[in-house]
Structure formats: C-alpha cells, structure tokens
Image: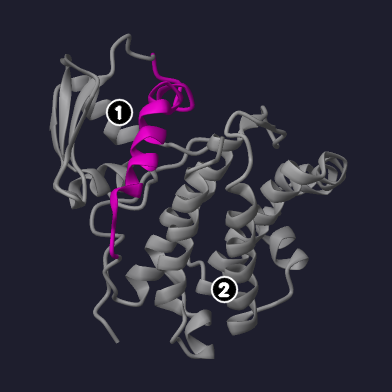
Amino acid sequence: MSLAEAADFLEESRTLAALLEPQDEAAFARATQFKGWTINDVLVHLHFWNKAVDLAASDEAAFKALLDPLMAALTKGGLRAYENATIPERGRALFTLWKETAEDIAARWAAIDPKQRIPWVGPSMSARSAITARQMETWAHGFEIFDVLGAERPESDRIRNLVVLGINTFGWSHQVNRLPVPEIMPELKLTAPSGEVWTFGDAQAGRISGPATDFAAVVTQTRAVADTALVIEGAVARTWMDHAQCFAGPPEKPPVAGSRHRAAKV
C-alpha cells in the first residue's frame, strides 16, 4: 500500500518551486498580503512544519523533544520568532533547503502506510491526513507568493485533497467559532481544473457551486468569499463560507474583500 497523496504534495511543492527558481535574492524579502509575511517568512514556515511532520513519522522520541519548546512558543505567542530562530537560512539558500527537503520527504512518504498514525501537536493523525495538511499549507501559503509576484498558479485536480479537507472540517469551522454545527452539510457542486464536476453534501441544506479552486481558497482563508466566483444558496451555506477554516488553532478571520489579490506582474 502506498501513499498517493505524497505525489500531490510533491507536485504542489514543485509548482511553487518553479515560480521561485528564477527569482533573484531580493525577491525573497518582499512582503506579501498575508500579515506582512515576506517570502522568506513563508518558506521558513513551510520548511519548519515539513521537517516537524517528517520527524514525527520517523523519530517519535525526537519529535516529543521538539514539543516542549514548541508548545512554550505557542503559549507565549512567539511561534514565528521560534520558527525563524530555528532556521537561519534566508533567500536562495532557504529556497534550496526547502525545495530539496520537500523532494526528499515526498519520496520517502510515498512508501508509508496511509493509515499509519503520526503523533502531532494535538491529536495524532493518519499519514494521509498529515501529508495532505502539508499540501494544504504549501498551496495556501504559496497563494500569497503567487499573488505578490503577479503570477497565476497552474492548478490540477490534486486540489481535490483540499476540497475534501474543507468538507471534513465543516463541523470544526463551526465549533472553533462557537457556532452550532448543522446536522446536514450543504451540497457542493464544484468544477475541477480538469472540467469534471465534483458533488458532495445535501441540497436540502443549501448549495455552494463554482470553481473547486475558489472553494479551496475560501476554506484556507486565502480569498474573501466576495472575491470568488462561488454561488452560495441558503443560510447554512452562507454561515459556513463566512467562517470556513480548514486548519487547526484559534478562530481566524477570513480576509476582507479586496485585500488578497494578484498583483500586477513586475
């Protein structure tokens, strides 16, 4: 049994790497539209958590040793400073480190049993969920890099993993915002990059239709709902899209309309 999602993580990483490969050293210091993070900040964050999940899968004792300072940083609100202090490389050196590590992780994780339990900061996860989370982070944080560099990301049907993650966190999106969880999830009719239509849920609770990439952008909070082509029908569907959050942690506010967009190409 192999972990097919490792190939999706690899392609996600390679897509971002292809954009960054020709950039000069100065480009990595450019600030993005996401909380003022620079491209360096994004790569530090992606590399740190790629390494962390790989360590969790390969050396549980070493991962547990990492947890104490990590949890202390989380508690004190200094996680970003901790990540930056742990990874000193910047610019093209950081880019090369992130890219080569992602390639290595993807190659080794392809042979992992998808059901293997991976210890984590919170509850353990299956290997499939863990590598899908890394694909999600690469896609979501890659978004601000594509935006600031004025580039359109080539998409593929690997985005389905993120759609499923958004569906699986339907209840969580309500819980983290202290909202009652509806008994039925609205119907999704999403058009994949290939043109295939993916359907989930139940129309009696409302409907969300449009591009699958737009749905992924909303659940990862990389675009305001108003800046997408999604058509939202019904109160349950509207509440979900206004509060969607497919990642762990405290409730985060989605971007306001117009705040996240592709810049003019430089």
Q: What secondary structure is marked by label 1?
A: helix
Is 227 a magenta residue?
no
Q: Residue at x 61, y 77 (%)?
A: 96
Q: Residue at x 70, y 36 (%)?
A: 120
Q: Is residue 116 above or below residue 253?
A: above
Q: Quadrant of the C terminus?
A: bottom left
Q: Is residue 39 above or below residue 117?
A: below
Q: Amino acid at mark 2?
A: Asn
Q: Residue at x 48, y 52 (%)?
A: 7
Closest to the observer, 30 or 203: 203
Provide the residue span drawn in magenta.
154-180
Q: Which residue is mark 2?
A: 40
Q: Main secondary structure of the magenta part?
A: helix
Instruction: Determine which of the numbered discs, if any, sits on residue 57 in the image.
Output: none
Q: Quadrant of residue 211?
A: top left
Q: Quadrant of residue 231?
A: top left
Mark found first going from the N terminus, 1 or 2 = 2
Q: Quadrant of residue 2?
A: top right
Q: Which residue is mark 1?
A: 240
State the separation of the CA atoms marked 1 and 2.
Answer: 32 Å
